[in-house]
Amino acid sequence: MKSRERREGVTLVHTGDGKGKSSSAFGVVFRTAGWGMRVCVIQFIKGVWKTGEQQAASRFDNIEWHTLGDGFTWDTKNPEQDIATSRSIWQFSKQKILSQAYDLVLLDELNYCISYGWIDAVEVADFVKHSKPKWLHLVITGRDAAPELIDVADTVTEMKMIKHAYKNGIKAQQGVEF
């Protein structure tokens, strides 16, 4: 494994209206952890319910997990609270990225907070471009990735929904969606 001094950290953005953005990012998380590297997962939207990813991550000593969001914010009853929470999570995320304690940081669902206007896209893009350690891998997920973020990313993948079980009345299934 390359030392940090020899590593070229990449920024990945997973976006689009299809399923699999976070799931793909969690694959990267477990791949990175499998190589013995330190990982930090920060979830912006998801609430405090149990997920299979978090259950699996708890078995790794080198994955730190933070579920800090208020839940499904598109059904919000208190947008001011969601804005404050999102901005607080962004400040926390910057501290974790700059701490030099991790080899990979996942900012799960950050794109939603940017697209809602709760966090400034230019600020995030500037931070990624100018402040992210050169050797750090960064993964950012969520629909509607801002053009500024797409511009500074090294790899951008758009997930496209063709068909989804929910549209046929099948609710989220444990082990597949959570």
Image (cartoon, grey):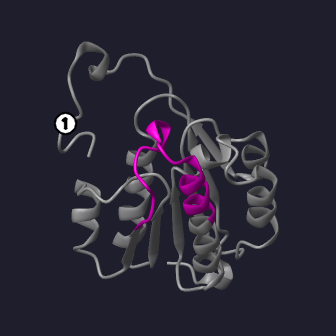
**Residue occupying the point 71% across, 51% down:** 153
Residue sticking out furthest to the left: 174
Task: In this rendered view, identify the residue nearer to me: 20 or 30.
Answer: 20
Q: What x and y, as percent, mark residue 156? A: 63, 43
Residue 100, image quadrant: bottom right
**Residue occupying the point 26% across, 56% down:** 49
* Residue 55 within the segment the image draws in magenta: no
Q: What stretch is highlighted in magenta?
A: 67-87
Q: Amino acid under label 1?
A: Gln
Q: On the picture, is 133 further left or further right than 62?
A: right
**Residue occupying the point 67% across, 47% down:** 114
Q: On the picture, is 169 further left or further right than 90?
A: left
Q: What x and y, as percent, mark residue 144? A: 63, 35
Q: How many marks?
A: 1
- Report which residue position mark 1 lands on: 173
Position of 124 relative to 21 (above/below):
below
The crowding category of the residue bearing disc 1, from other C-alpha atoms within 10 Å (few below 14, some 14 to 19, many at least 20), is: few
Position of 76 relative to 18 (above/below):
below
Q: On the picture, is 44 further left or further right than 90?
A: left
**Residue occupying the point 50% across, 25% down:** 160
Q: What x and y, as percent, mark residue 83? A: 61, 54
Q: On the picture, is 114 further left or further right than 160?
A: right
Residue 2, image quadrant: bottom right
* Residue 82 within the segment the image draws in magenta: yes
Residue sticking out furthest to the top: 168
SS of the residue under disc 1: loop
Q: What x and y, as percent, mark residue 157? A: 58, 39
